[in-house]
Each structure stands twice: as structure tokens, then as C-alpha cells.
Image (cartoon, helix red, strand yellow):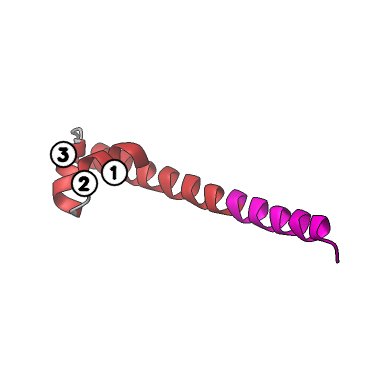
């Protein structure tokens, strides 16, 4: 197998992997947002990013980027 063919196969593999990773990340974001909305509706109040960061021990900026 030539170098170019090998390069193309590697690129196809990593492209498929990247797509699967992004799809999984988007599903997680969607599910987290959905759960937050349900909790807000059940409690009849807004949940702030600061509250979420404090409760989960995840950095506030990381949460902002993720949601």
C-alpha cells in the first residue's frame, strides 16, 4: 500500500472518529440542557451557572463552554 493510500485511510478513519466524537458531545449537551430545563420547571425557578458549578465542582468557565 502506498503512502498516499495509507494517508487517505488514516484521514478517513480520523474524520469518522471526529464526527462520532462531535455527535456524542452534542448529545451530551442536549441531554444536560434538557435535564436543567426540567429541573428549573419542577422547582419553578432559574438555575444559574454558578449554582451548577458549585454543585458539580466543575469550573464555571468550563460549564459555559460546554452548554
- Of residues 14 and 62, the one nearer the viewer is 14
For label 1, the residue is 62
Q: Position of residue 2 (x, y in %)?
A: 85, 62
Left or right of 3: which side holds 65?
A: left
Which secondary structure class fits the magenta region best? Answer: helix
Mark 3–mark 2 contact, CB under 8 Å? no
Look at the image and tell me whether residue 44 can be seen: yes
User: Residue at the location (21% across, 37% down)?
Assistant: 49
Q: Which residues are magenta?
A: 1-19
Depth-wise, is mark 1 or mark 3 nearer the camera? Answer: 1
Could you tell which of marks 1 and 3 lies nearer the N-terminus? 3
Determine if the magenta segment contains residue 11. Answer: yes
- Res 50 label: 3
Quadrant where the N terminus sits is bottom right
Mark 3 secondary-structure assignment: helix
Residue at 36% x, 47% y is: 32
Identify the element where label 1 is drawn. Answer: helix
- The residue depicted at 41 percent of the width and 44 percent of the height is 29
CB atoms of marks 1 and 3 within 8 Å? no
Q: Earlier in the sequence, mark 3 or mark 2?
A: 3
> Is the residue marked by circle 3 packed among few (<14), some (14-19), or many (20+) residues within 10 Å?
some
Q: Is residue 46 above or below residue 24?
A: above
Q: Which residue is mark 2?
A: 59
Relative to residue 43, is residue 38 drawn left or right? Answer: right
Please report contact status of discs 1 and 2: CB closer than 8 Å, yes or no: yes
Quarter occupied by residue 45:
top left
- Residue 18: % across, % down: 59, 51
Q: Image quarter for residue 39?
A: top left
Measured Cα–Cα span from mark 1 to mark 3:
11 Å
Instruction: Based on the picture, tell me whether residue 57 belongs to the magenta stretch.
Output: no
Amino acid at each position: 500500500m502506498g503512502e498516499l493510500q495509507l494517508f487517505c485511510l488514516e484521514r478517513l478513519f480520523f474524520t469518522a472518529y471526529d464526527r462520532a466524537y462531535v455527535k456524542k458531545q452534542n448529545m451530551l449537551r442536549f441531554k444536560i440542557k434538557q435535564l436543567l430545563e426540567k429541573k428549573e420547571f419542577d422547582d419553578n425557578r432559574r438555575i444559574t451557572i454558578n449554582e451548577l458549578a458549585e454543585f458539580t465542582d466543575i469550573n464555571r468557565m468550563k460549564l459555559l463552554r460546554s452548554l
